Structure formats: C-alpha cells, structure tokens
Image: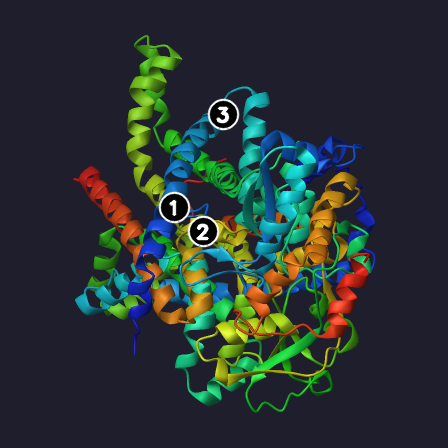
Amino acid sequence: MRRMLSVVVALAVTLALAAPVGAQPDTTAKIKETGVLTIGTRTGSPPFAYINKDNQWVGFSIDLVEQLVKPAVEKEVGRTIKIEKKESTPPTRIPLLSSNAVDLIAGTMTDTPQRREVVDFSLTFFYTGAQFLVKKGSPIKGVNDIAGKRIASQQGSTNAKIIREKYPQAQLREFPDQPAAFQALIQGQVDAYTNDGIQLAGLKAKSPNPGDWEVVGDFYSEEPYGMAMRKGDVKFKAAVDAGLRNGFESGKYFEIYDKWFGAKGELPYPMTPTVKAYLLKHSGK
Amino acid sequence: MLDLGVIVANFKFLVVQGLFGLGGFAGGTLRLAIPAIVLGFVLGIFIGLARLARSRFVSLPATLYVEFFRGVPLVMVIFWIWFIIPQLLRLPIPEYGVALTAFVIFEAAYFGEIIRAGIQSVPRGQVEAATAVGLTSAQTMRFVVLPQAIRNMVPALVTQMIVLFKDTSLASIIGYVDLTKAAQIVNNREIKPFELYLFIAVVYFVFTYSMSLFARRFERRLAS
Amino acid sequence: MSYQFKWSVLWSGQSGGWLLQGVATTLAISGLAWILAVGLGILAGAARTVPWRPLRLAGTFYVEFFRNVPLLVWMFFWYFGVPPLLPRGVQDWLFNHSAEFWAGMFALGVYHGARMSEVIRSGINSIPRTQFEASVAMGLTTFQAYRLIIVPIALRLIVPPATNESLNLLKNSSVALTISVAELTFQTRQVETYTAKAIEALTAGTLIYLVLCVSIAWIMARVERRFAIPGLIARGG
C-alpha cells in the first residue's frame, strides 16, 4: 500500500512538471492549419441547440455560428472552414475549452465575472434571466416560494450556484444535463426546475404536453449569453466579435432571431425594446 | 401500456447511429466495442507476461499498472483522458479516440490479470519437464504453457469481454452517440424512458448473452 | 494554453467539505448496495444449485438478465423508469427522501447481486458433491445441508473473488453521478466546475478512490487469512 501511494505521488509530480508553460493560445492559427472550427454546444436546450425530430443538431446558437461567426473567421484565416459540433454541458464546457477539445462554446453559457477569470466571452448574443418551470397550478410562483422544496438545476450552472448560496433552505438537486433535470420534473421527483427563462420556455414548447407546464417567477438573476473561448486568444476573439457585430449591424442577427423566436418561429419570444437596446449597446453601437 | 411506436419511429437512429455508428454523429457501440476488445486484449497479453517477467524492472511497472487501474473507476479514467491528456499534449482528441483509449488502457489491466492467472494455472512441473527435454524457455511458452493457459482462461476472458462491451455505455457521458446516448437523445424529446431503456437493455442483452452462451459451451467442451 | 497549478483549491473554500461529503456518500451507497448484492447473490447463487427446476430457472433469469445489461442503463431504468409505476404515496415518500440515492443503490445492488451470485455459484460448485451427500446421509435436510455445511464452506472459498467484485461495486458507484447522486466523482466534478482546476480536482478524486480500494483489499486479505480452512484453500504467496 505504501509503495502504491508513493507511485501515485510520483505520477502526480510528473504530470505537474510535464504541464506546458507559457505560449498564448492562438486558435486562428490552428483553424488556418486544420480548416475546422470546433464548437461545443448543447443537445437538449431548445431552441438554442438541440437534436430535432429528424435527429439533426440545430438551434439559434448554432445558426449564429454558421451564419455570422464562420464568415468572419474565414475572412481572418483566409480560407473556407468547416464547423464541427461536440456536446458540452455546464460541468464540461470549461474543461473542454482548456483541453483544446473545442474552440468555442456556443450554446447557452452565461457571461459572468467569475467565469471571465478563466475564459473570454464574445459580445452578448442573448439576454435572459433565471425562472422556474413547474407543473401547472404549482404553489411555487417564484424564488420566494422555494424554501423546503425540491429544486432541480444543472450542475455547474449559474442558477445552481445562486440557489446554493442564497437560498440554502431549498433542497437543490444538481443534474449533469438539462434533459435529466426536466425528466425529473416530469416525474414529480422535484417540484420545480430552475434555469434561464428562455430555455424553460423552449423546453415547455418542445415537450410532449406543453399545456401541463408553466414558467413562473420574475428573473432572479441576469443571464447575458456569450460565446466562450480560451483566455487571451486575442485574434480569435476579435474575429468572433466582428462576426456578431456585423450581424447586429446588417440586421442578419435579427433575421436569425426571427427564425427561432419570431411570431412564426420555433418559440415565439418577441425581443423587448430594452433587450434590443442592451444588445446593441453592448455590441459597441 | 408499452408504447412501441417510439421505438419504431426512432429505430433507424437507435440502431444505425447508436449501435453501428453510421450517421451524423460520432458514435456507435459496436464501432467502439470491437476495437476496444481486440486492442485491450493485445495490450493485456503484454501486461500479463510483463507481470511474470523475472526482471523486477519489467514486472514492477506492470504490477503497478494493474493495481492502479483496478483501483480507480473507469469514469475517472475517462475524465482524465477527456480533459487532462489533451491539455498536456496540447492536442485535441476526438470523442472516439478518448473513449477507445480509456477502454483499452483500463481493460488491459483486467485482461492482464486474467492472462497472468491463466499462465500461473499451468503446473510448475510441466515447465520443468519441458526444460528437461531440452525446450528453450520461448519454446516452453509457445508449445507447453500458452496452449493450456489459453484453454484455462477462455471463460474469464469472455466474461471480461462482456464487461467491456457493457462498459462502452459509459462513453455516452462524453457525448459519444452510442446505443445509450442515442436512447437518451430520443428520450429527451419523447419522454418515454421505460420503453427506450428497456429496448436498449434487450439489445445489449442479445449481444452479451450470446457471448456468455459461447463461453458456457466452451467451458462444457473443456470439462468433457 | 498554459496551465497554472493551484493545489490549494482542494482545501480552500468548500472543496474539502464537498470531497468529504462525496466520500461519505460513496461509502454509504456502496455499503448498502453491497449488503443488497451479497443477499441477492447468496439467494440466487444458492437457488441455481438447488434440485428444483423453477427455482433454478428464476435464479438463472435474474443473474443473466441483470448482469448482461450495462449498469448505466440500469441506473436510468431504476431512477426514471420505475418510480412512475409505484403507488403515489410511495413515490412522494421517495421523492422527499433522496430518490436518486435509493435508485442508485438499487441499481448498484441488484446489478452486482447478479455478478456476485456467479462468484458464489462457482464457489458452491467447487465443493465436492460428496460433502452434500454425506450431510444428507447424516440425516440433515437439504435446507440444513446448505445452511450448515455448503454455504459456510463456500463463503470462505469465495472471499478472494468476492473482494474483487466488492471493489468493482465501489468503483461502479461512480456511475450514479449520471442520476445526480452526489458521490465522490460528482463532487470531484463539482470542485472542478467551481474552481476551473481540472487536474487538481481529478487527482484528488483518483487518489481517494485508490486509497479506499487499497484499504479494502488489505482488510479483506486479513479476513481471508483469518477464516481460511486449513488444507482446503491453497493460498498463493
């Protein structure tokens, strides 16, 4: 047993020494070489990124990458590129970025000051806030009713952190992914599922019986969505931001928004003037 | 009560994508399980033989390898290879590579143990007799020890292969669209957990049970 | 991307507490599942050697079906598939008392019970038939022969393989993270998501598992030596 442990310690030390030092990340150089931009996105977060009835991977965030970010990155690296998609969830997305498995997180990730210490964020591309999804007629009407109730959340999400820290009276259950949490709600394992309002509305709309569910409560947090990338990757961030900014300026962004959230879109969710002003202000216009 | 419509409607996705790995996603249970079994077995032979080597410089690392991987959960090994190794090598590894590497490295420790036990089950006297009639140690291994050892270890080997086959379901954790992940994806939108998980349970069972029937028959043939 | 090591994340803030809670949960779920697995394993293993066909068939069905389907599938099955079939009152009680823990415990126990019974069956089979015949000849009933002769001997024979299987159970409890059981691997990920220090978190988790497994193996080796039947088991060095 002692021999065993000494080897493990030796192994840890070797790993520590072997860790690479220095060198700023340069994703654009990598993309130029490989012709592939790998994004990490969701499989069960309609309408941002999900697998539809035809088993195709689609969504608002994916369209933003395909139609806005891709051309800008192509311009930067001077060649046509391909988008490759991988699944990333709240607990896995930062490790996937730092392990180089993906280059860009484009899903439903909230831009927070704490996360900014480890990753960089693009311009905000969506603005929402946390609410609750409950069975119709539930006594839970907002964040003040959750004491003693079983609340589902996603491990590693901003909402889970807020509930854990500010509402310790709630019984928090953390699931590795959104579908598992929603499933638990459907079965009555939990009393409510908390996530960003827009995602809850998306889940409700895509569920087999949308009428059974309602999204309740005022936003108890602010959740501006950004695309995340490795920290200090200046050229790549500039390209991603340029793509989004062009989208806001040319109106292309609003066309894509309309496709998913417009009156005839997948999930009607008209943009309020405040949100529009917020997005434009943050895009530097 | 069972709603088999959900299986019928998604049969192609579950089987073609989930089981065979042909489709829009990186995935496939068989595409992962078969190479993992073959490569894990091959690496296991080396590890098993290394553990029996006379030189401590060979046997000690092999022993530590086996003890280490038998002391940690496969899920942990998968996370190491998924998050840490690419960071150290500064090289992205696709999901398929992550899953295959994790299974081969992990299962080789178990295969190695079976092979070591199999070789040790051959009575010592046989080796001495072979040496006495003038066989070299390589010849003794090749003609005397291995043929008997392999017969002794087939049941355990097949059992381990079944374990590996089932373990491939853990690749779903890293977003590899195998049978389990395919069922999860369909369930996420259809919410029919009972039907879907029962269906894939039966698919897994068909494969693993045929493997164990084979092992039983082999055992019986040896016994007679 | 350069990686800055910061091992202090493991003991600063909540990380240490989380890891400890994780160890406690891992031990609790594995311990309970182990009791269930051994109970089921003995029942099924014995059932399959009994001279009465229906019981043998039931034992065989249980063992073959449960050990041939991946544990992960069983986790989903027990957690998502089974509760809706239970009476409302039971469901409510479960959901208020960590349903994920009980479902995970069941999945783990029932799955490993099937595997454990294989270990037990080969233990029983390795006892010479004559022992059974001798006990019956001495006037014991079949049940008594099993309870007093066969099972006690078999139990000793199976300690080494059963130890391996128990360690597998402990390691497999990590799969319960997929149904939100806050066991050790889950807490390792928790530390990782809160600190963004993957290497440190995973190293800590890996080390804890190693220590747990090595200590159990050591204790069981003691037990094995203590209960060995002289002359019956040839012990290797």
Whole-angstrom CA distance, mark 3 to mark 2, is 36 Å
Q: Residue at x 32, y 8 (%)?
A: B134
**Residue B72 vs residue C166, the one in the foreground:** B72
Check disc 3 and report its element: helix, strand or loop.
helix
Identify which amino acid the numbered label 1 is placed on. Answer: Gly
- Answer whether labels 2 and 1 touch (C-beta < 8 Å): yes
Residue type at the position of mark 3: Ala
Mark 2 surroundings within 10 Å by alpha-carbon count, few (fewer than 14), some (14 through 19), many (20 or more): many
Q: Is residue A15 above or below residue B52?
A: below
Q: Using the rendered image, report if marks 3 and 2 lie on a common chain.
A: yes
Q: In this orientation, which residue lies closer to the viewer: C37 or A112? A: A112
Rendering coords of residue B21 (x, y %): 38, 46
Q: Chain of mark 3?
A: B
Quadrant assignment, res A38: top right
Provide the residue designation for mark 2. B177
Q: Write the residue at 52% across / 53% down.
A: B173
| A281 to C8, vertically: above or below | below
Instruction: Please give the residue where the numbered disc 1 appears in the rendered image.
Output: B21
- Residue B112 in the image: state x and y as whole percent: 45, 34
